[in-house]
Image (tube, rainbow, N blue to C red):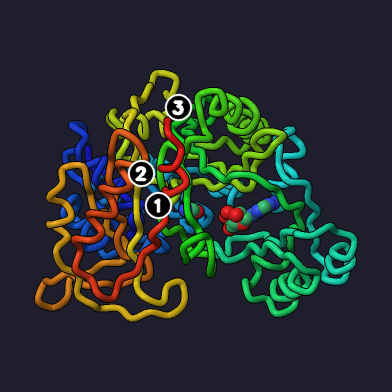
Amino acid sequence: MKVLVVGSGGREHALCWTIAASPLCDALYCAPGNAGIASDAQCVPISPEDIPALVAFSKQQAIDLVVVGPEAPLAAGLVDRLGEHGIRVFGPTADASVLESSKAFTKDFCVRHRIPAAGSLTFGDLDRALAHLRRCTLPVVVKADGLAAGKGVTVATSLESAEAAVRAAMEDRVFGPAGDRVVIEEFLEGVEASFFALSDGTTTLPLAAAQDHKRAGDGDTGPNTGGMGAFSPPPAVDAVLSRQVMETIIEPAVAGMAAEGRPFRGVLFAGLMLTDEGPKLIEFNVRFGDPECQVLMARLRSDLLPALLACADGHLRHVDLRWSDDAAVCVVMASRGYPGSYRRGSPIRAIEDAESDPDVVVFHAGTAADAEGALVSSGGRVLGVTATGADVASARSRAYRAVGRINWPDGTFRTDIAAAGAAVTP
Ligand code: AMP
Ligand code: GLY
């Protein structure tokens, strides 16, 4: 089979690393990929947003399966356009991607299908939104309706900051049209977890859960980021809780989307708050998480490719996946300054020293080769140093030992990734 992975981050490197190991895969391409992905796949310089070029490449190369990493091309209809040309693809159509691209849709959808989620109201009118805020208890959560590159959510502990968030979205339009409607939502208390399941439109298959670390600084301080590290499995998500998440959130969502004429095919990522009243949905994403994908792929024992094909073809009921009992921890190394401004082009050395441990793999995100072919940084999140071990504590110490071997003076990382998970003895 010829496979094309779309995207250029750590998530896509983890997907390429996994798919390249499949005996079914004869040729693997990644658009556009990065310097690390280049050792697992042939990188092709096409942007994930350039749908006509991706379709043309897939036809020309007779690609058997396209695997879409990020959300933007999904919401823009990449899967629909590939489908029109008879190209098989793993990922939801634009109609089904609305579970991520519109929080307002998803809030109403959860009410229609009795999926437990934070209570909320959606506003398209600034004055009504501001009037509603004055009646809310604090903290309150303000969310831009549309895709805002992970920056559209404000957890406000004062009325002033809640009002500022509403005005930024609706008056100053800092998110463009994505902020024309805002969702004002009840604050949920508990432990967060990311839960992943595959769907072929009707059948669902649970994957695994992970825990992300969204803030830039140790102790969950500083600005929100794409994710500074992850571990799997989270101690809070045992078999009983997984069953509960499947029955109360994933299965009703997949059945509801099918009933509404937008069958969901792909990976459904439920961002959960584990509350005293049980797991509640914070948000759906319609793709793998980054860096959650890195720890999931490190724990996967089965061939992923047949499962992705089965989602595309509607045969998921015939698929089962095996997971390692080992834990995995991914520590993200980012450019100093991220998520604010940072410099690109600083040299990164000794990745091979980090990978001299057979239980360590370094997934690349923002890396490139300079004119001489040496590895340099080229983005905010740069490396995902991923290790496995018998438990979270041993995977964690192995991951940090590997981080210590990488020679990249311009890089920073959190020192407390998976610390909470490691403190729980299984
Ligand atoms: P998002 O950008 O949608 O992933 O949200 C960013 C973060 O905001 C989440 O990971 C949560 O920590 C927090 N958050 C979002 N919604 C809520 C909520 N209803 N209650 C508490 N925290 C929330
Ligand atoms: N790590 C969170 C996300 O991928 O959205």
Q: Which residue appears at 26% of the width and 40% of the height?
A: 19
Q: Nearer the viewer, mark 2 or mark 3?
A: 2
Secondary structure type for disc 3: loop
Q: Nearer the viewer, mark 3 or mark 1?
A: 1
Residues marked 1 and 2 touching at CB (< 8 Å)? yes
Q: Is residue 67 above or below residue 416?
A: above
Where is residue 15? Give x, y as percent: 31, 45
Q: Is residue 30 rendered to the left or right of residue 206?
A: left
Could you tell which of marks 2 and 3 lies nearer the N-terminus?
2
For badge 1, the amino acid type reads Pro
Depth check, front residue: 31 or 367: 367
Question: Can you tell which mark lies on residue 295?
Answer: 2
Where is residue 1? Give x, y as percent: 22, 37
Q: Which residue appears at 42% of the width and 73% of the height?
A: 338
Q: Which residue is mark 3?
A: 314
Secondary structure type for disc 2: helix
The number of discs equals 3
Depth check, front residue: 358 or 57: 358
Q: CA distance from mark 3 to mark 1?
A: 27 Å
For badge 3, the amino acid type reads Gly
Q: Is mark 1 within 8 Å of ligand 2?
A: yes
For badge 2, the amino acid type reads Val
Q: Which residue is mark 1?
A: 291
Q: CA distance from mark 2 to mark 3?
A: 26 Å
Secondary structure type for disc 1: loop
Q: CA distance from mark 1 to mark 2?
A: 7 Å
